[in-house]
Amino acid sequence: MRPIRGLTLCVGLAAVGAVSVRAAVADVKVIANPSVTASSISPSELKDVFLAVRTSVNGVAVEPVLGKGGPVHEAFLKEYLGKSDVALTTYFRSLVFTGKASMPKALDSDADVAAYVAKTKGAIGYVSSNATAPGTKTLDVK
Amino acid sequence: MRWRGVWTAAAFVLGMVPGSAYAQQFSLGDVPVQVHGFVSQGFAKSNENNFLTMKTRDGSGALTDGGINGSAQFTPKFRAGAQVYLRNVGDLGNGRFELDWGFADYRFTEWIGVRGGKVKTALGLYNDVQDIDFLHTWALLPQALYPIDLRGSTIGHIGADVYGTVPLKKAGELGYTAFVGKRPEDPEGGYAYGLSTFNHYDSYAGNQQGADLHWATPVEGFLVGASFLNQQIVGTGTRVTNGAQHREESKKDQTMQFYGQYARKGFRADAETRRYIRQQSLVFLNRMVNSDTHGWYVSAAQRLNKYVEVGGYVSRYVHNSRLDHSLPNNHIYDNVLTARLDFTRYFLVKVEGHFMDGYGAQDSIRGFYSQNNRSGLKPKTNMLVLRTGVNF
């Protein structure tokens, strides 16, 4: 009886963990300046945009905008870039110090990201799914 | 001359340490411009041989380098920038400013772009970023593949690159760079220093061609690749013994490098191997110098939290693979343990232990020189390296 009860507990915890992870992912929405014509973006395109491999989406020049930390930032990096914050910083510094890219803009809060994306042609960023982001459009990631 | 270089380096370092370590960004018209820089300072203490032309037996702080760059994104596809760099490592570098890179870059699409000017050479995992101390776990990169003294032989070229990234859908991504150009002079480098008992070089440079291809596999964080570098080097100068003219020319000068990396969740493992084949004709002596050197290393590092990373590597270098590998003058083996402490995003300290076996040949140009080990080279050397740096 006891092993089965332990197993049930483990499965239960794993399920809760999975739900938590999914919730963390679901908490992020990708926003873009209305000049970005696409209404959706694939995960690999999104990754390439945020790793400075791709500079346009559907022929429109784009600029990635990062958060400076916090759960939304961490969830976005984990889900879409597969890198930690430290690894992403190292990655961009290796590009910057060999002249291959500029350091992307990193802003303190959802409000700052939303405001910058709204006013900057081609900007793509991410905010909490609950955040209001007037003047931006939401991109479906699929 | 040497002291002037040291003071230049010191002034550069002091001048670059910013009150607040933030990158500078401003606009020239509508063009965003970024300025970044770094400085690193090291200290090394060894128990036996002096290493890298420093007086490490006594303890040496002659391990300084730094760089500052500016770059501008003129359009989404076109960018340009430049970086100056200097170093003072024992008798190497001597605080000489050099243009580290300076180029214009036009990216047509993600799968093809071109850049021209002075460009860092893509060779293996770390050749182009070998100087950027804060990017690495290690205080000294594995010297079997990235010798500080021979930096100038691979670090960059004056020429052009074609590069790109090709998505393979579910099979991952291919990245490539092909390049052609001239190898710049390195008068304060290890080659001129190591062979200064034989020749004084006026020039040691030539043409380079090569390519790098790497595959980011579908396995998250797993990358493999290969690089090739072909050079036609001409060295001219005078012989030390009699002042006669000296000239040497490459008949064959090829570097092949294979590498793999796995990085996930704060863990990173690297493995690289390099083979260097060199057939150099000493024209006036009517002699050939043939060597076939092998180097490899395996490393692993784990980031414990945002402040601490620990790791180690095993580095193996064999100067002439056709001779007995066990001879201390034909190999340098190095086992290394490191702790890296990131106090902030911009300031770090590294503590590293090296346990070295062997010292290689006089023309290995990998840290051990008869000029600064006048009582003879010993077969084993342990060394402690401390290195700190700031970047912005």
Image (tube, coloured by chain):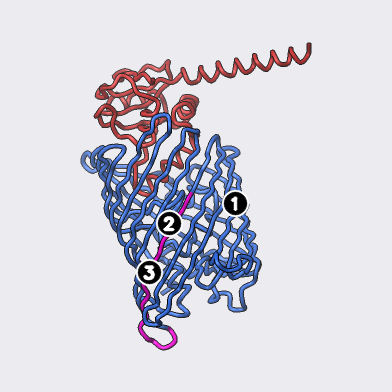
Q: Residue furthest top?
A: A1
Tell which tag, 2 or 1, sits nearer the viewer: 1
Instruction: Give the residues in magenta.
Output: B240-258
Residues at badges 3 and 2 in contact (C-beta under 8 Å)? no
Q: Are marks 2 and 1 in contact (CB under 8 Å)?
A: no
Quadrant of the rendered structure where residue B385 is? bottom right
Q: Residue at x 58, y 78 (%)?
A: B374
Residue B173 falls in which quadrant of the image?
top left
> Is A67 colored magenta in this rendering?
no
Q: Which chain is red?
A: A
Mark drawn on residue B225: none
Relative image position of residue A98 (x, y in whole percent):
37, 49
Label 3 or label 2, whichever lies nearer to me, is 3
| Chain that appears blue | B
The kind of secondary structure element at disc 1 is strand
**Towards the viewer: B310 or B171:** B171
Q: Which mark is residue B66?
A: 2
- Image spot of residue A132 (x, y percent): 37, 16
Q: Chain of mark 3?
A: B
Which residue type does callout 2 highlight?
Answer: Gly
Which callout, 3 or 2, points at the residue further toward the start of the chain?
2
Q: Amino acid at mark 3?
A: Lys
Give the CA separation, mark 2 to mark 1: 25 Å
Amino acid type, mark 1: Tyr
Pick the residue in front: A80 or B270. Answer: B270
Q: CA distance from mark 1 to mark 3?
A: 34 Å
Q: In the orientation shown, which residue stands out farthest toward the left?
A: B29
Read off the residue under disc 1: B313
Q: Which residue is mark 3?
A: B251
Q: Neighbour class for label 1 at 10 Å: few (<14), some, many (≥20)?
A: many
In the picture, measured across the screen, residue A47 lies left or right of residue B299, that is left
Give the chain letter at badge 1: B
